[in-house]
Amino acid sequence: MVELKTAAELDAMREAGRVVGRILDTVRRVADVHVSLRELDEAARAVLREAGAGSPFLNYRPSFAATPFPAVICTSVNDAIVHGIPDDYRLRDGDLLGVDCGAIVDGWAGDAAVSFIVGTPQPADSRLIETAEQALAAGIAAAVVGARIGDISHAIGSIARAGGYGIMEDFGGHGIGRHMHEDPGVPNEGRPGRGLRLRHGMTFAIEPMLIAGGRDKYRTAMDGWTLLTTDGSRAAHVEHTIAVTDDGPRILTLA
Ligand code: MG
Ligand code: MG
């Protein structure tokens, strides 16, 4: 059952999303050569604390995980696609860092992610990230009243495949609201005109995960959480929480 949010509920979700946007801006500012991933998590925790917000990531334990997630952000470096655990690794010049983050405010969840280069970018990495951002923008633009989930998926997948990239299998976007992960799934590839019809008040997290090497497969690291490319190529993950409204798609996770 997909809940349709009222105007007041969408505004409440916007407040959760604003905290998420602020965390991502903060982490982006702090992330630099020699800074550790754990320091980024500490910076994110400070923003949550200051906002009086909760973390849907901390101690999260979905069915695929052997242990609860130990941090408030995921930090995925280079061949890590998603779900990287912030540890004592210190960022190096040219690293491709993906940061995924959530917040809970007044019982409503927000979820968003950015990918960027630390220090000096390589052209291939910049192109990968830009394509992921274009796929996200196209997915959001397709999230209009009367369209279907498949239209979002098709918009994302078309751009990713045209760029020659792999699309991570098994994982994709999702409904969001009172919980971070709700029905329905929003796959990153699909057929237009198929799936749930979109209505005013539906909210989704849309999140392309692109793999530079062109394969869709992934493998799980020894830590049981980090999901890696199988060929060692880099990956980019970007995400926004959005609302479908009569006035068009509304992005809820900007600072
Ligand atoms: Mg996320
Ligand atoms: Mg998500």
Image: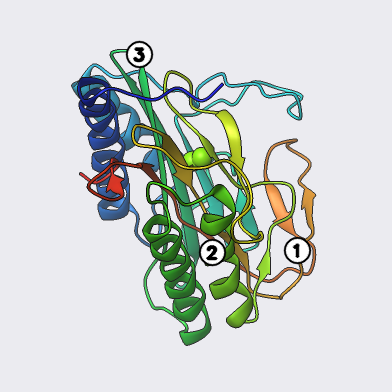
Q: Residue at x 36, y 43 (%)?
A: 242
Tag 3 secondary structure: loop
Mark closer to the chain start, 1 or 3: 3
Mark 2 is surrounded, within 10 Å at the Cα level, by few (under 14), some (14 to 19) or many (20 or more) other residues, namely many
Residue that badge 2 annotates? 156
Q: Report the Cα–Cα distance between label 1 and label 3.
A: 35 Å
The tag on residue 226 is none
Mark 3 is surrounded, within 10 Å at the Cα level, by few (under 14), some (14 to 19) or many (20 or more) other residues, namely some
Give x and y (percent) for residue 177: 42, 25
Q: Quadrant of residue 203?
A: top left
- Closest to the observer: 69 or 91? 69
- Closest to the observer: 100 or 221? 100
The tag on residue 107 is 3
Q: Report the Cα–Cα distance between label 3 and label 2.
A: 30 Å
Which corner quadrant holds the N terminus?
Answer: top right
Give x and y (percent) for residue 34: 40, 57
The tag on residue 216 is 1
Mark closer to the chain start, 3 or 2: 3
The answer to whether one can see residue 86 in this image is no
Q: Is residue 72 above or below residue 161?
A: above
Mark 1 and ligand 2: say if the CB distance to the nearest ligand atom is below 8 Å: no
Of badges 2 and 1, nearer the viewer stands: 2
Tag 1: amino acid: Asp
Q: Report the Cα–Cα distance between label 2 and label 1.
A: 14 Å
Q: Is residue 23 left or right of residue 188?
A: left
Give x and y (percent) for residue 162: 60, 81
Q: Quadrant of residue 26?
A: top left
Farthest residue to the front: give it: 146
Tag 1 secondary structure: loop
- Closest to the observer: 179 or 7? 7
Q: Is residue 170 above or below residue 43?
A: below
